[in-house]
Image (cartoon, rainbow, N blue to C red):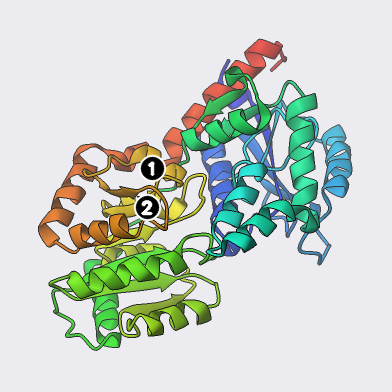
Amino acid sequence: MEAKSLRITILAEQADPARGGAERSVRELTEELNRQGVETTLLTAAGTPDGRHIQSLFPNTKAKQIPLSRIEDALREYLKSHPCDLLHSTLPVCGTDVYQPRGGSWKQTVLQHAQSYPDPIRRFLKTRLHFLNRRRTRYLCAEHRLLTTDKKAVIAALSESVKTHFLRHYNLPPQRIAVIPNGIRIPESPAPETAADFRSRLLASAGLNPSAAAAVFLFAANNFRLKGLYDFITPFADAVRKSPVPLLLVIAGRDNPRRARNLAWLAGLEKNLIFTGPLPNLSTALAAADAAVLPTWYDPSSRFILEALAMAKPVLTTALNGASDFIQPGRHGILVEHPRCRRQITDGLLQLADAKTRTLFADAILQDNVREQVSITRHVQQLISLYKQILSRENKPL
């Protein structure tokens, strides 16, 4: 059964990489499958068709979100004239052979979104009244329907934690879940002078000499609350007060910085936080930084942390991040329990503030070949094996 004989349709809501990591990932997945000889079409609910490998069910719509019921109806019509061997969907639609939600379980998403609020009353209300978010409720119901009534759908979990969530919430047999750790296209390292110039400008904006022995931490996300930024500012302030070298936190992302700025002002950190807004390419910022930090409340497997590891950058993240599957704590970086572990985060930042410790972490990442472990090439090879197993079990003709 040769990979080149497979025809795969991948269904996603959007594929515009400017929207975020999930969209970027699904495009990279499609491109790599085709590169490895699998005839793959990325089918989006909305968006503009882009070449023969990216098609849209509703190419002329201006709506940002298409109801799931309309997507399912249009998908059935599309597959009548565009048959495939397997449907690999990131959305919980009927008829899916491989279900790979880029955001993990919808049930877990609801729970972790609620946990990201500091007020316990608000956390309680967010958990109990989640059904007020009509779109999320529809996806929750659709996921429940898919996994409890459609016994053929196999989940391709992006991490061990995602597998645990599906087992817990849906009481599924383990054989219906295959853990295929997330993968990324390995970023190209920028020219040294480009990274050095970027770092010099960061230090200058903080009032430091461009050659100052500062420790620069990069945080990149589009949802500052869910990814733990607001909880991070207090332990970061503790570390700033204790560190023998200046510490800078560079924050990249689309979210409104107002609340983070206010928290930084209250903590006396106005000069220690630098907001860049969204960056089209993180590789320059990663090359200029000393470590990557993502104290997230929930992430099936963060692309940002994988990109940092691919560039041999030490990381600090939480056990709630599926990317922790690739991290040996104390060898590749710092792993804390959750974003409100104030002392753990402070201690971790102080370790990363030490240049010798960072060098040891970076050397270990290179020695352990983590770069290849997090690659999209490895991810797709494992997916192809899963496709073949499913087709073999179902005796589908190729």
Mark positioned earlier in the residue sequence (2 or 1): 2
Residue 284 seen in this snapshot: no
The structure residue drawn at horizontal position 87% and vertical position 46%, both measured from the top left corner, is 69
Amino acid type, mark 2: Thr
- Identify which residue is drawn at 19% across, 64% down: 353
In the image, residue 150 lies at what x, y percent? 78, 25
Q: Please tell me which residue is depicted at 36% across the width and 72% down the height of the picture.
A: 250
Q: Position of residue 106 (x, y in %)?
A: 66, 44
Q: Residues within 10 Å of mark 1 (few under 14, many from 20)?
A: many
- Residue ID at (46%, 61%): 228
Residue 324, percent from left and from top: 38, 42
The residue under label 1 is which amino acid type? Ser
Q: Is residue 25 above or below residue 211?
A: above
Q: Is residue 2 left or right of residue 64?
A: left
Establish if 41 lies above or below 277.
above
Mark on residue 317?
A: 2
What residue does disc 1 label? 324
Q: Residue furthest front?
A: 121
Is the residue 267 above or below the residue 49 in the image? below
Quadrant in which the N terminus appears: top right
Q: Is residue 89 left or right of residue 237?
A: right
Would residue 54 appear left or right of 134 to someone viewing this image? left
In the displayed orientation, state which residue is furthest to the left.
356
- Tell me the element at label 1: helix
Local secondary structure at mark 2:
strand
Determine which quarter of the picture holds residue 50. bottom right
Front-lying residue, 118 or 36:
118
Residue 163 in view (yes/no): yes
State yes or no: discs 2 and 1 in contact (Cβ < 8 Å).
yes
